[in-house]
Image (cartoon, rainbow, N blue to C red):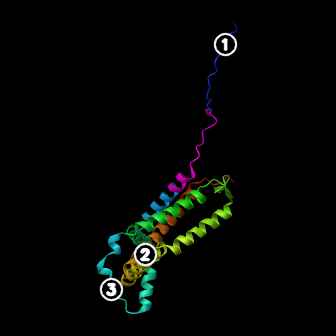
């Protein structure tokens, strides 16, 4: 009687990195994008001005002329830029939350852009209904879909109205907020920077003089 062949068990081999070959972990594109976006958001929010300074009622006054109002808006926008962006984002969020159908449409459009174009691997073409689409065709398709969603649904009117509300709020606040105290703060900061630069330059000169005096004289 012939001996039966021994059963072969599948063995999964794992390659471990040696001491001289460190393991390099490749971060997924979506996680890298979210991490970079969160870092940029935190950096931007760290540059915002205090909200108490933005809403200081003692700094509000009516502008005398249209040119003065324009001057105030320009100066206040350069100073409260991050705060104004937050006000615009809040107006957009309130408009979308009060219209859940438009919010779902916009989220679906954003998901289509993210998964079909932004984070889709370049070596994997888009296949829909048995047809292969190139990157250019995918871009044209998504752009046409975005135009149809914006102009043929209520999403476009909601976006435009929220942007207009945000711009109106920023212009009203910028025209009524006096920027004189901001000029004083900027002037004090400039004087402080000049003082620090002067002290640092003087210290560097003194250190160079001391090093020259301490160096031995060359032999004759």
- Rendered location of residue 30, percent (x, y): 54, 53
- Rendered location of residue 134, percent (x, y): 69, 60
User: Which residue is farthest top?
Assistant: 1
- Rendered location of residue 124, percent (x, y): 66, 52
The residue at the point 59 percent across, 54 percent down is 215
Identify the element where label 1 is drawn: loop
Decide which of 144, 31 is in the foreground and name it: 144
Identify the element where label 2 is drawn: helix
- Rendered location of residue 112, percent (x, y): 55, 60
Quadrant assignment for the N terminus: top right
Residue 150 is inside the magenta segment: no
User: Which residue is farthest bottom?
Assistant: 65
Give the labeled residue for mark 1: 4
Horizontal relation, residue 120 to residue 150: left or right: right
Give the labeled residue for mark 3: 61
Distance of label 3 from label 2 (alpha carbons): 26 Å
Residue 25 is inside the magenta segment: yes
Task: Return the disc, 2 or 1, that comes first in the chain's sequence.
Answer: 1
Say above or below: 31 vs 191. Answer: above
Distance of label 2 from label 1 (alpha carbons): 78 Å
Distance of label 3 from label 1 (alpha carbons): 99 Å
| Span shown in magenta | 16-34
Decide which of 90, 125 is in the foreground and name it: 125
Q: Main secondary structure of the magenta part?
A: loop
Task: Return the disc, 3 or 2, that comes first in the chain's sequence.
Answer: 3
The residue at the point 65 percent across, 55 percent down is 127
The residue at the point 45 percent across, 68 percent down is 102
């Amino acid at each position: 009687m012939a001996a039966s062949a021994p059963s072969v068990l599948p063995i999964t081999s794992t390659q471990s990195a040696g001491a001289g070959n460190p393991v390099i972990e490749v971060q997924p594109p979506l996680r890298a994008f979210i991490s970079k976006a969160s870092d940029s958001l935190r950096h931007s929010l760290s540059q915002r001005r205090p909200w108490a300074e933005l809403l200081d009622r003692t700094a509000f006054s009516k502008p005398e002329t249209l040119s003065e109002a324009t001057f105030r808006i320009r100066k206040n926008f350069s100073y409260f830029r991050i705060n104004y962006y937050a006000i615009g984002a809040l107006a957009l969020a309130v408009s979308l939350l009060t219209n859940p159908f438009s919010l779902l449409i916009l989220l679906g459009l954003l998901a289509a852009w993210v998964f079909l174009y932004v984070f889709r691997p370049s070596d994997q073409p888009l296949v829909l209904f048995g047809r292969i689409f190139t990157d250019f065709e995918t871009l044209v398709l998504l752009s046409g879909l975005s135009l149809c969603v914006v102009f043929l649904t209520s999403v476009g009117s909601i976006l435009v109205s929220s942007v207009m509300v945000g711009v109106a709020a920023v212009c009203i606040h910028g025209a009524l907020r006096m920027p004189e105290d901001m000029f004083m703060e900027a002037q004090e900061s400039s004087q402080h920077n000049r003082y620090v630069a002067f002290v640092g330059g003087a210290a560097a000169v003194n250190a160079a003089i001391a090093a020259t005096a301490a160096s031995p004289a060359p032999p004759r």
